[in-house]
Amino acid sequence: MARRRRSCLLVLLVLCLSQLQYSAVRRRLYAVVRQWVRGSSAMPHRCLPDELASSDTFGDASPAHAERFLFYSPQFGHSNQLVALRNAAAWAAVLNRTLVLPHLLGHATEAQYRLGKPDRPKAAYAEVFDLARARRGVRPLKLVQASDFLALGLRPQRVLQVTGSALKLVRLRDDYFEALSLKWGPPLEIRMRSFTPHSIRYSFGGCTHHRVLAFRSLFAAWDVRPGRASPPGWMVGRLPGLTWLDKQAMPALLAPVPNLSRLVHSIHNWSLERHDSLLPPSRANATLADSGVGRQLPRELACLHLRRGDFEVDCPKYAAEARSKQGRGWVKSHFQKGWSCLQSDRVIEFNIQKLQQRAQHRKLAFFVATNAPLKSKFLRKLYPVTTLRAVMGMINSSGLLVSRQLLAPLLDQLVCSQAKWLILNVFSTFSQLAMGFIGLKSGHQIGWVRDLKMEEQAVAGVNISYWQRQPGEAFA
């Protein structure tokens, strides 16, 4: 009886469709009928850019067999660019498009933007990360560097700006596309309620006639957090989508080139050797020859992340926000848990004493990841404390032809990922990425994360804490 009723309804729908005058509406309804006949409750895929823009301002029709690309602009600083890379890999996999790897960019200041002269040195992806390994590791996703993509001469006429309730739109810039001589006119805004595989496929899966989808930003444009269950129905190759993304693709995408990997291990070893007077204090400007790779090292490395610069402005704002009724939940929670945003010398001393108590009999060597000159009087008493400034000779002799401004934050994170003990800043994306690199070292056991749980720290063999305020200390 149910089958007969279904057949009658199908005949009725076909008769109604045959009477429609508008071909676009007819095609749309035919697609709905096909989905219904197949027993699927999912709506057919749309192409939101087509629906929001006329054909004379957006369109690059292409044959069905042509390779299709997803291109995006890297926004903000180093850590946020790597977060966006993960998002972009997920989008490209969901939409079955080749991912265009943008350049890695330095972080210009607001003052430089106001003067119209942002200092954003750039480096090709393959100058920092192992492109061959990435291509093997992300299969079936395909990768192409921005320079190789541009050589194809493909240019969409509009850049797309996806927006949602959680998407960060503050201070979005177009200087990257402009530096590549790409002038695509004003962005076409695409409003989305969520950024899941289903919503992305539904909104852009019907854009297969466009060879390139170019996005102004994909930062905060992916709702699926690491460590969660993979969204139902999302598979990449034979793996659940999130397993592929965080335990296969991200370890491959963020694998450093051999020269960078050797440099990281050399800095790690040299930092340990300094503490046992294996090198005289006068040789602060070490080279790779000083690194002593292969020696038995008696100490364990402790990484201290001291964020300065922009945090000297941002942390008082966070503290004021935590006191207000309108403050964001995560800001209030961080301060309520006693975590510190901007550390005074007293806070640094308090936390290092707690670290040494946890380490018990172990001998520690200290590496400080910081974006400003080290001014802490207490840390100077712990001499020798290693920063990147102490190993500039080693960096210069590494063979890496990358701007020091661009290389420094990544190098700090990679060195910290070699540490056994870490004091990180819970307010900083940099610290989250340092934990991410630790997770990547454990491959399929942990994979990409932005917060290492206690059991994951045990697997990775690390001990992580956040800067804590002293009891009774005011928000800072």
Image (cartoon, rainbow, N blue to C red):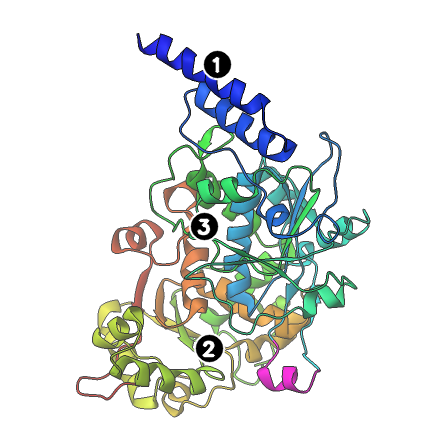
Determine the residue positioned at 52% across, 44% down.
203
Along the horizontal axis of the image, is 277 left or right of 205? left
The percent position of residue 334, horizontal first and vertical second, equals: 27, 73
Quickly name the residue at label 1: 11
The local secondary structure at tag 3 comes to: loop
Q: Which residue is mark 3?
A: 195
Circle 1/circle 2 CB separation < 8 Å: no
Answer yes or no: is residue 394 visible.
no
- Residue appearing at x 60%, y 52% in the figure: 52
Of helix, strand and loop, which one carries label 2?
A: loop
Residue 267 image point, x, y percent:
53, 67
Q: Label 2 belongs to which residue?
A: 277
Could you tell me which residue is drawn at 62 percent across and 76 percent down? Answer: 392
Contact flag, marks 3 and 2 (Cβ < 8 Å): no
Looking at the rendered image, the disc whose residue lies closer to the viewer, 3 or 2, is: 3
Within 10 Å of the Cα at label 1, are there few (<14), some (14-19), or many (20+) other Cα atoms? few
Name the residue type under label 3.
Phe
Give the image location of residue 247, x and y in percent: 45, 43
Is 24 left, or right, of 167 in this rendering? right
**Earlier along the polypeptide chain: callout 1 or callout 2?**
1
Image position of 215 with respect to 11: above or below: below
